[in-house]
Image (tube, coloured by chain):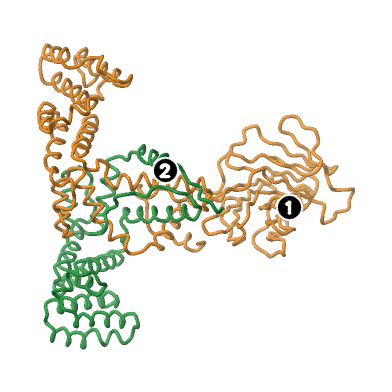
Chain colours: A green, B orange
Amino acid sequence: MAEDKGTDTEAWTKAVSSIATSKKVMNQLVMNYLAVQGYREAALCLHEESGVELPAHMEEINERENIRAALLRGEVRHGSELINDFDAEILDTEQDLMFTLQQQQLIELIREEKLEEALSFAQQELGPRAVMDAAMLDELERTMALLALDTNSAESDDSPLSRMLSVDQRLATADKVNDALLTSLGQDKEPKLSSLLVLMEWAESKLKEKRVAFPPLDCIPSSI
Amino acid sequence: LELQCDEHGVWRCTNPAASAEANDVEPEGQVQASDAGRVAASGLLKGNRKFESDAAAVRADCPIPPSSGVFYFEVHIVDKGRVGHIGIGLCAAGTSLGRLPGWDEHSYGYHADDGFLFKGSGSESYGPTFSTGDVVGCCVNFRNNTVLYTKNGERLGVAFRGILTEPLFPTVGLRTPGEIVEANFGQRPFLFDIDSLIEEEKRALLATIRGSALPTVKARLPAIVLQYLVQCGYSRSAAAFAKATQADAGGAQAWSNIEERQRVGQLILAGDIEAAIAAVEKHSGLLEARPALARKLRFHRFIQIVLTQPPEVAIDYSRSNLRVEDCQTRAERDELEDVLSLLAYENPKESPVAHLLTKAHRESLASAVNSAILDYHGQPSVSTVERLIAHTRVAVEHMVAENVPAASLAQVDYLLADDAPTQPTGEAAETG
């Protein structure tokens, strides 16, 4: 199987263009995403504007949205309080989650240049936790390296270290928290849209193994 | 197929006329003349002596396709004959058909008389014996490379692992006079609930696929969702979502005319085609470049007039605006006829052309107009979500065609279904 078995790119593109999906199905897919990720207001608007059904548990979605919003603003303490309101035990039972939040807290302190507070926070809260876990220790060391960074110039360059200061890091933390909350509720933390994307990538990788050529799904926007 | 051994040691097998899928029978050795569907393979039993080599098997014509994911067939023991020394299983091409399944390498079987599994290199106890009246099924699973059996609708344990590395054929072997079996490859309903097992496997495959994904996948979704909301014209949803994700609103190209597109869509859905047309005409040249869409709008305008104004106005409008000669296709001409016929009914909502008055009909126009405005401004008129779904469907089809193992289990429809659960059940996790 040395040569590529090129499928006709045109035939593929034509096949893709000929498949229509109903608006209702797509609206449901997006609503499912908004519900799982906890975007309550957007879900309400989508319900009004498209007529697609609202998910169940809107109140709980509201709480998750508030938690996410707080974390996105960098308000880790406030976010942690909301998490405790939502689930009193989760931060005690999920040590990884607690560490992630504290790490984010450390990052925010460094960003605000409250360096003394950052140091004592690291020593009192994160250090004791990290000595028991190699991965956590790694993360702590990476985060501490931020202390040496000039935060003003860091935000404009693209190194892994400065990415810790970006909104992407806050988003990742918020996602981890959301996943943990959903898991503790016994709900699925994977939006169908996410599974679809993964399925596509899996199918593409299998086709590449079989040396089948196909046009890429162009214009997938990269992450914000 | 039906395979029988008579007292002279002659094996007969018949193909039922209505045999659903591929599997015709390929008997070995001397094939005696047959009338339609009846094939006799030469018998191997001589007198009263039984040698280990004295058996006869039949093997299906086509190997089991790996892309099927899960393949299942059942064998009904019609009569155990003298001893009931029957074997059911799988074998590779070229294995001897004078042997029971599992007696040789590349051959695997579950035997009725002792409930043992045979797999070339040896045998081991496995499950119950089976006899007259029993139905034994063989389930081949390409997702986790296992084979399991069922007896009378009940699942037995996993029988073989890791054997699906070569093309394998369903096979049945008989040994003593009077044995009669009947195989079912799906031409009749199965005793075992194979559908539930297939559902479990789909879930399990999905879980495995997701388990292998990188965390960066989720990070790409906000942009895809925002693009969808903007493309559809859901202005408030898009604004709320952009705010909640701190997205760069200006980055979504179609943002600039979102509210206008939404307004036009709402006008159309409300049936106010006159206002909608006026709004669209503000984009000079748009309708001129799209005569088919312009005609569609005029059809809908006519419908609006029929519903709201006296018939004379409608007729007047049709004379100036709806001309058969303009129609480019048979379908368009038919549609125009339907539209014009509305005038003939006192109560159009109960007429054969009532579908023209439905919200669904207007939704389709709204969607077409929305796409046209986007296209006119050089913006993508099909959302990434829609293209993602279509691209994935096509990719899965190609996987099945390329015989990727278990590809048929990866179904987009299953994923999109309303109640498709996304956690694997306990049982699938066990066999996985």
Front-lying residue, B218 or A14? A14
Q: Label 1 sits on what residue type?
A: Thr
Tell how many labels.
2
Residue B397 is situated, as x and y percent measured from the top left of the image, at 46, 45
Q: Label 2 sits on what residue type?
A: Thr
Residue at the limit of the structure toward the front, as seen here: A3
Residue A139 is situated, as x and y percent measured from the top left of the image, at 29, 79
Q: From where the camera sits, is residue B124 visible?
A: yes
Q: From where the camera sits, is residue A188 visible?
A: no
Quadrant where the N terminus of chain B lies? top right
Q: In the figure, B148 relative to A13: above or below?
A: below
* Crowdedness near tag 1: few (<14), some (14–19) or many (≥20) residues, C-alpha within 10 Å: some
> Label 1, on which residue?
B95
- Disc number for residue B2: none
Q: Which chain carries label 2?
A: A
> Label 2, on which residue?
A9
Residue B142 is situated, as x and y percent measured from the top left of the image, at 54, 55
Left or right of B110 on screen, residue B376: left
Left or right of A46 on screen, residue B142: right
Q: In the figure, B315 relative to A76: above or below?
A: above
Left or right of B261 on screen, residue B113: right
Front-lying residue, A92 or B119? B119
In the rendered image, which quarter is residue B378 located in?
A: top left
* Crowdedness near tag 2: few (<14), some (14–19) or many (≥20) residues, C-alpha within 10 Å: few
In the rendered image, which quarter is residue A23 located in?
A: top left
Q: Distance between the residues labelled 1 and 2?
A: 42 Å
